[in-house]
Amino acid sequence: MIFGDFFFQKKWSIRSALFWAEKVLKNFQSSRLESEVLLAAVLEVDRVFLKKNVDDFLSVAQQKKFRKFIRRRAHGEPVAYILGEKNWANLSLGVSPAVLIPRDETEVLAETIWKSPRSFSPEKILDVGTGSGNLAIFLAKKFPDAFVTALDFSPAALQIAKKNAERNSVCVNFLVSDFLQKIDDGDFFDLIVANLPYVPTKISISREVRREPKTAIFSGSDGLDHLRKFRSKLSRVQFRELWLEFLPTQVSEIKKIFAPSKIDFFPDASGQIFFARITP
Ligand SMILES: C[S@@+](CC[C@H](N)C(=O)[O-])C[C@H]1O[C@@H](n2cnc3c(N)ncnc32)[C@H](O)[C@@H]1O
C-alpha cells in the first residue's frame, strides 16, 4: 500500500494534481480557484507559476501535503483556516478557528472609514470586537499618528490579533474586555468602530461558517442583542464618529437603537446598506 501510494504519487504533475483536486472538490463553487490557491501555498509559488509549469512534478512531501489540504477543504474547512492566513485589505493576517475570517464587506467598511471626509485627523481610535485585529491594524496603518486601542472578550482572539499587529508592524493597545468594561469612564475617541456579532440565531449558516466561532457571529433572535447592549454602555465614553456593520434588513432597528443621534448609512460593494456612521 505504501509502495503503491509512492508509485502513483511519484509522477504527479501540477496538471494532474489540480485535475484530482477539482474532482474531489466538485461540489464546491470555486473548486478550481481553491485548488490552485492551496497548491500554490504547498509549492510556495504564485498561481501564475502553476499555469506556466503544468508539467512540473510534485515531490512526495508536496503531494502528501496537498492531498491533506484538499481533504480538509472537502470536509468544509475554510481555505483561510487551512492556510492559517487571510489576505485582507492588503494586509497579511494570521487566522485560526479562534477568530472570524475577515470578510470582503468589512474591507469596504474599512475603506469607507478611511476615505470619509472629516475636519479632524483621528488621534484616538477604538475597535470593539477586534477578532483578528483586522480593522484596528488597518486603521493604525492609515492613521499612523493615532493611538489605537482594540478590545475583544476572547483572550484567544486577542493572541492572534497581537501577532497580526506585529506581523504588520503596527502598534495597537489590545485589551481583553467585555464591551467597554476596561475603558475608563469619560474616555474620548475620535473614531470607534464596532463590528460586533449581528447574525440572527434562526439563520442557518453554511458548513464553512459553522467552523468559525459562534460568539463572533450570532446575536439573539434578531441579531441585534450585541448592538443593543453596546448602545446601553456607550454613554460611558465620548466620541466623534462611531462606525457599525450589520445586515441590510436591520437598518430600521439600527435607527431606533441609536436614536436620536445622527446616522448616515453606507453600502457595501453590492450596493446594499451594511454600515452606519453615528455622530452624537
Ligand atoms: C463579527 S466579529 C468581528 C471581528 C473583526 N472585528 C472583523 O471585523 O472581522 C465580532 C467580534 O466581537 C467579539 N465579541 C463578541 N462579544 C463581545 C463582547 N461582549 N465584548 C467584546 N467583544 C465581543 C467576538 O469575539 C468577535 O471577535
Image (spheres, rainbow, N blue to C red):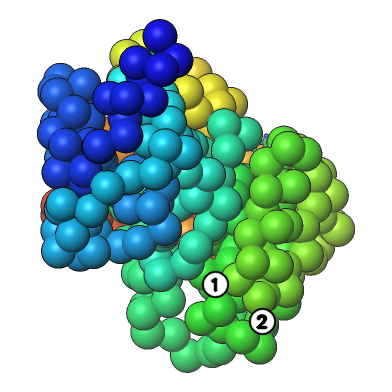
Q: Tell which circle, 1 or 2, labels the residue nearer the N-terminal end.
A: 1
Q: What is the three-letter code of the residue carrying label 1? A: Leu
Mark 1 in CB contact with mark 2 (< 8 angstroms): yes
How many marks do you count on the picture? 2
Residue drawn at x 30%, y 62% as measured from the top left: 46
Question: Who is closer to the viewer here, 76 or 105?
Answer: 76
Q: Is residue 129 shown above or below 243?
A: above
Q: CA distance from mark 1 to mark 2?
A: 8 Å
SS for callout 2: loop
Image vertical order of residue 17 relative to residue 180, above or below: above
Q: Residues within 10 Å of mark 1 (few under 14, many from 20)?
A: many
Q: Decide: few, some or many residues near mark 2? Use Cα within 10 Å; few <14, some 14-19, many ≥20.
A: some
Camera-side residue of 86 and 230: 86
Question: In terms of image quarters, where does ligand 1 lie?
Answer: top right
Q: Residue 53's mark?
A: none
x and y, in percent, of residue 184 in the image = 86, 58
Q: Could you say which disc has been placed on residue 146 in the image?
A: 2
Report x, y in % for residue 241: 52, 68
**112, above or below 230, in the image:** below
Res. 227 in view: no
Q: Quadrant of residue 127?
A: bottom right
Instruction: Give the residue displayed 45% in from the left and 52% down from the top.
Output: 86
Left or right: 66, with 154 as reference point: left
Front one among 66 and 79: 66
The three-letter code of the residue at mark 2 reads Ala
Give percent across and percent down for residue 207.
35, 18
Residue 139: assigned label: 1
Residue drawn at (23%, 53%), measured in percent from left and top? 56
